Amino acid sequence: MSKKVKKLLAVLLSIVLVLAVIIIPQVASKTISSNLSVAKMVGKAPKFAAHRGLSALCPQNTVPAFQSAADEGFYAFEFDIHTTSDGKWVVIHNDTVDDMTDGTGDVSSFTLDEIKQLNIDNGNGIEDYSELKIPTLEEALSVCDGSDIIPIIEIKSCDTKYFPELLISLEQHGLIEKAVIISFELDYLKELRELSPDIEMMYLVGKPTKEAVDMCIENGIDGLDFYGLNVIPGAKAVKYAKEKGLKLAAWTIDNTVLADILTAAGVELITTNRILP
């Protein structure tokens, strides 16, 4: 294929992306079926992970959001974890409790007992719940008990000396060989790999690059999880990752056209707020 043809294809793909994001109308509801995906119609649909649980319908990173993802048949639900001041793993996205609860302050400044006194007061469908609390890692993993759904766990700010407790929790729920650990912090993944040769891990990045792929290979990281809209500028790195045998995932895609493009590029797992599997 000539360079001119490749450039033309890149331009056309860019136009498709713009149409998908800006012009193509979304359905009025908060969720959209993956039945609208061409990939699904031809039997090559990716696996979908519910971003912070089914956050289009339930407050993000809560047990109801995780249970809803399981009930809807998602392959996985993704969530974020931090450590408290007394070394307990809790599920929340931000470093502070301000945005999601009636409290203020850094997550790391609370003990588990203190953080459990706070009420979640923000998020989709919040009116359907009363006294909703920040979950512990154990409460999140319990959703997997008796279900085929996979937990995808993003490690945020934490004290790494509590990594053994994280692995023990996964082991107790029979998830060491099922769960996926992700993080933007490569040092977290490297340290965790030293503790566990079996846990699957993916390196989170904005744009896929050859350097990021090489770091995964050098450090025993199983895959690359990148921002889906960067599939075009990162096309060479995506191809390189596939050639090297890395798994590919993309975040956070809420449009079936974009999901199709990513699937065609070799992405196996797509994190979404609203595309139902």
Image: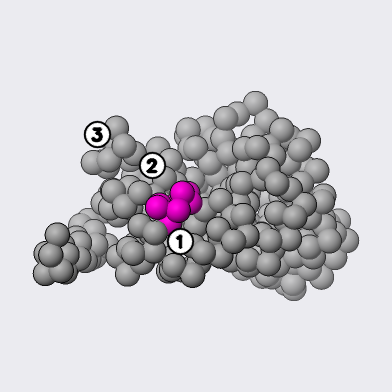
Range shown magenta: 241-248
Q: Is residue 72 left or right of residue 235?
A: right
- Which quarter of the picture shows residue 17? bottom left
Q: Is residue 84 left or right of residue 82?
A: right
Residue in view at x 49 percent, y 37 percent: 75
Is residue 12 visible in this depiction of the protein?
A: no
Q: For numbered disc 2, what is the local secondary structure?
A: loop
Q: For numbered disc 1, what is the local secondary structure?
A: strand
- Distance from the alpha carbon under mark 2 to that under mark 1: 15 Å
Q: Which residue is mark 1?
A: 226
Q: Are marks 2 and 1 in contact (CB under 8 Å)?
A: no
Q: Which residue is mark 3?
A: 42
Residue in view at x 49 percent, y 57 percent: 225
Q: Which residue type carries mark 2?
A: Pro
Q: Reply above or below: 231 against 201.
A: below
Q: Which residue is mark 2?
A: 46
> Residue 55 shows which numbered tag?
none
Q: For numbered disc 3, what is the local secondary structure?
A: loop
Q: Reply above or below: 28 against 47.
A: below
Q: Are marks 3 and 2 in contact (CB under 8 Å)?
A: no
Residue positioned most to the top: 146
Q: Which residue type carries mark 3?
A: Val
User: Where is residue 56 shown, x and y percent of the image?
Assistant: 46, 51
**Callout 1 crowding tier (Cα within 10 Å): few <14, some 14–19, many ≥20:** many
Q: For this rendering, which residue is in front, 17 or 102?
A: 17
**Callout 3 crowding tier (Cα within 10 Å): few <14, some 14–19, many ≥20:** few
- Distance from the alpha carbon under mark 3 to that under mark 2: 11 Å
User: Where is residue 168 shown, x and y percent of the image?
Assistant: 80, 43
Q: Reply above or below: 214 against 144.
A: below
Is residue 269 visible in this depiction of the protein?
A: yes
